[in-house]
Amino acid sequence: MMASYPRKVPNILITGTPGVGKSTISGLVAEKTNFIWREVSKLAEEHHCLDEYDPEYRCPLLNEDKLLDVMEGLMVKGGNIVDYHGCDFFPERWFDGVFVIRTNNTALYDRLSARGYTGKKLEDNIQCEIFETLLEEAQTSYKPEVVTELQNNTEEQLHENVDKIMNWIEKWKEENL
Ligand code: DAT
């Protein structure tokens, strides 16, 4: 195992079910700070980390080991906002803060339908949120003091969440000078 490295700025993971608002929040935080938004799905595509096609979910499968190799170097200095709908395969040492974004059923249903999700794909994602799958995954993969759950149903909450994450970054910097 590699030793953890000191960082002057933190790395943040934004996770949750598809449609909860990870990209929206990550994009806004990146816009207001000098953090770099790392969309894991895009990185995977750009660096050819997508393997076989999963016919059930109609999406390609992620080659996690290859992706981790690509990301390792990016994470060293901190200042990353990593956005992904999974969190248990990243090295725990990468992240100083893990934010699990949550959305209620009706709002999530509307957002995913608007995205064109139907049938099993839509139902599975709604169930994933109802069963708190990503919250549990974060809680089993990271220390409790690192994990924060954020409700993201309304525009008002969206801006509160961006502020909360920015305040968290400032506090981390003060505590880790
Ligand atoms: P994700 O990256 O988790 O898949 P997203 O950021 O693409 O989610 O958001 C999905 C949709 O929901 C998108 O149209 C933006 C909208 N949205 C995000 N946060 C919201 C909020 N707090 N209130 C209303 N709509 C929101």
Image (cartoon, rainbow, N blue to C red):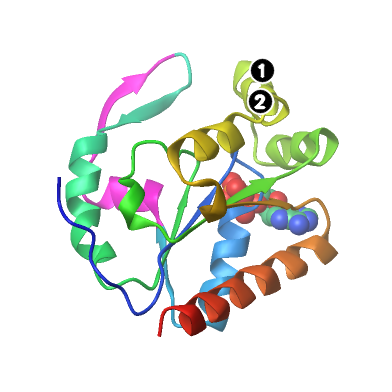
Q: Which residue is mark 1?
A: 119
What stretch of residues is rendered in magenta? 39-55
Residue 48 in sight: no
| Residue contact between numbered discs 1 and 2, judged by CB atoms under 8 Å | yes
Magenta region includes residue 43: yes
Residue type at the position of mark 1 = Gly
Element under disc 1? helix
Q: Is residue 129 above or below residue 1?
A: above
Q: Position of residue 153 (x, y in %)?
A: 80, 50
**Which amino acid is tagged 2?**
Leu
Q: Quadrant of residue 127?
A: top right
Ligand 1 within 8 Å of the CB at mark 2: no
- Percent x, y for residue 142? 45, 44
**Mark 2 packing: few (<14 Cα in 10 Å), some, or many (20+)?**
some
Q: Counting other residues with Cα less than 10 Å from the Cα at mark 1, is it few (<14), some (14-19), or many (20 or more)?
A: few
**From the image, which quarter does the C terminus lie in?**
bottom left
**What distance separates the C-alpha of mark 1 from that of mark 2?**
5 Å
Left or right for 100, reference 67: right
Residue at numbered disc 2 = 122
Q: Relative to the observer, which residue lies in front, 113 or 171? A: 171
Q: Which label number is shown at residue 42?
A: none
Q: Determine the residue positioned at 44% across, 38% down.
A: 141
